[in-house]
Image (cartoon, grey):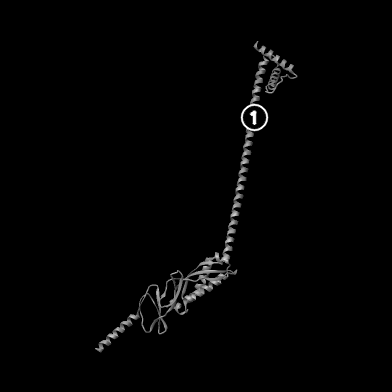
Amino acid sequence: MDLIYIMLAIAFLVIVFAAKGIIIIQQAETMVIERLGRYHRTLVSGVNILWPIIDKPKEIEWRYVQLAANGQQIIRKQSVKRIDLRETVYDFPRQNVITRDNVVTEINALLYFQITEPVRAVYEIANLPDAIEKLTQTTLRNVIGEMDLDDTLSSRDTINNKLRTILDDATDKWGVKVNRVELQDINPPRDIRDAMEKQMRAERDRRAAILEAEGLKKSRILEAEGYREAEINKAEGTKRAKILMAEGEAEARIKVAQAESEAITMITKAISTTKGDPANYLIAVRYIEALKEMVSGKENKVVYLPYEATGILSSIGGIKDMLSGIQK
């Protein structure tokens, strides 16, 4: 009977021993195992068998961020046996840094890192999260201290790249790969922000005034060019009109002269048959036309004959003789 109890006790111990020796590792996790105080091996995902007494997992300090009921972040640190191999986001608390032009600025940064060599992360550094945090803070102060405030506000990508390069080189011996560094907020003091807003507003007003002046200048230039082209076109039109008018008057005079020439020729032919003088006829016609214009006005009250009226009468008499001769 006692032998049966002993066998049951031994079987129970074997079961407990076997249960403690079987460890299941999840995907993207690992565990560093020490045997009798020295590094033995790194477990992979899946089922792993250990010796419960001589094999022991190595613990590592880790950092967790939790949100309280009021929305504030609570940072909790504890020792863990399982090492997370996924990329981790490290949200650093806000810190004050001084720029090269002695402006105190509040900066909040984010760090994305990943453990690539668990053995180094465990044995090369005592507290990995604190080491990364302090290293990031000091590096950020050094980088910002070499830049002015304006450069700090306008060169976030440059700061991110510098921080990532420096941190990646420094954490390589810890088995950590720094993938990205992002600056969330850069908050200068209130008086500096007010001064920057005033400067920005003045700059915008200056640009607006410049654009308005340039627009007015272009408008006046276009208006002047339009007026000049209009005057040129108007002058060209006036010139062309005068040329056409002169050409018309010249052609009219030519036509009138031709008509008078033909009339004189016809009169000369008609008068030559009566053996009269054509000159008397033409002089008489001119005198009659001039006399008609002298007495045709509405305000002319006095009708008078010119001094050489006898010449007109003699010319008219000559015309009468010529006409009577033509009738005969």
- The location of residue 22, given as percent across then percent down, is 34, 79
Q: Nearer the viewer, residue 119 or 324?
A: 119
Q: Is residue 275 above or below residue 31?
A: above
Residue found at the very far left of the displayed protein: 1
Tag 1: residue type? Glu
- Residue drawn at (60%, 54%), measured in percent from left and top? 209
- The location of residue 149, given as percent across then percent down, is 57, 66
- Residue drawn at (60%, 50%), measured in percent from left and top? 216
Q: Is residue 264 above or below residue 219?
A: above
- Residue drawn at (51%, 74%), measured in percent from left and top? 135
Image quarter of the C terminus: top right
**Can residue 252 be seen by looking at this rendering?**
yes
- The location of residue 108, given as percent across then percent down, is 51, 69
- The location of residue 23, given as percent across then percent down, is 35, 78
Residue found at the very far right of the displayed protein: 307
Residue found at the very far front of the displayed protein: 70
Image quarter of the N terminus: bottom left
Q: Nearer the viewer, residue 234 or 53?
A: 53
Q: Residues within 10 Å of mark 1 (few under 14, many from 20)?
A: few
Place residue 294 in its image quadrant.
top right
Which residue bears the numbered disc 1? 249
**Can residue 150 be seen by looking at this rendering?**
no
> Is residue 175 rendered to the left or right of residue 253?
left
Q: Mark 1 falls on what kind of element?
A: helix
Numbered disc total: 1
Q: Nearer the viewer, residue 48 or 212?
A: 212
Residue found at the very far top of the displayed protein: 328
- Residue drawn at (64%, 29%), measured in percent from left and top? 249
Place residue 12 in its image quadrant.
bottom left
> Is residue 179 rendered to the left or right of residue 205?
left
